[in-house]
Image (cartoon, rainbow, N blue to C red):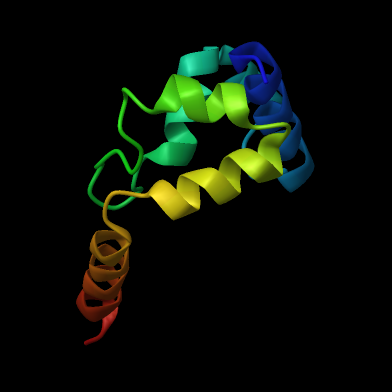
Amino acid sequence: MLKVNLADELRQRQYKLGRVSKELIDALTDDQIIDSYITCFCCGEKQVDANQLPQIIADAENMEQFFMVCDTTAKSKSNVINCVEGILREKEF
């Protein structure tokens, strides 16, 4: 898959989710929208090695396959879980 095609599929996904305005989604570069999917929302750590990313994109046939490969190669799934658990603990009073 080409990076531009992956970025387009990710934009289409965001349009359908409707959580962010189309203008904001369209303002993102291809790299930025892809980066938003491989970066921990909590701590900002990249879950896919930058050196692996081009090959992961090239090997993926579609967005879903990209997600699956990223999930299996994620650097620190436990870190994401720890981040989320930390947020939940902070919200408990």
Instruction: Quarter of the image for the N terminus: give it.
Output: top right
Image location (x, y in percent) of residue 60: 64, 32
User: Residue visible at 69% across and 45% down?
Assistant: 64
Q: Quadrant of residue 19?
A: top right
With 85 as the anchor, is 26 left or right in this view? right
**Vertical arrangement, residue 45 with respect to residue 42, above or below:** above
Q: Give the residue at x 30% y 60%.
A: 80
**Placement of the C terminus among the 4 image quadrants:** bottom left
Residue 51 lies in quadrant: top left
Is 63 rendered above or below residue 89? above
Q: How many marks?
A: 0
Q: Residue at x 60, y 28 (%)?
A: 59
Query: Which residue is nearer to you in this view: 85 or 18?
Result: 85
Query: Can you say whether 90 is above or below 27 in the image?
Result: below
x, y percentage for residue 16?
Answer: 78, 41
The spot of residue 22 in percent (x, y) is 70, 25
Q: Position of residue 63 (x, y in %)?
A: 68, 37
Left or right, 46 with reference to 23: left
Which residue ends up furthest to the bottom in the rendered image? 93
42 lies above or below 79 = above
Q: Residue at x 21, y 74 (%)?
A: 90
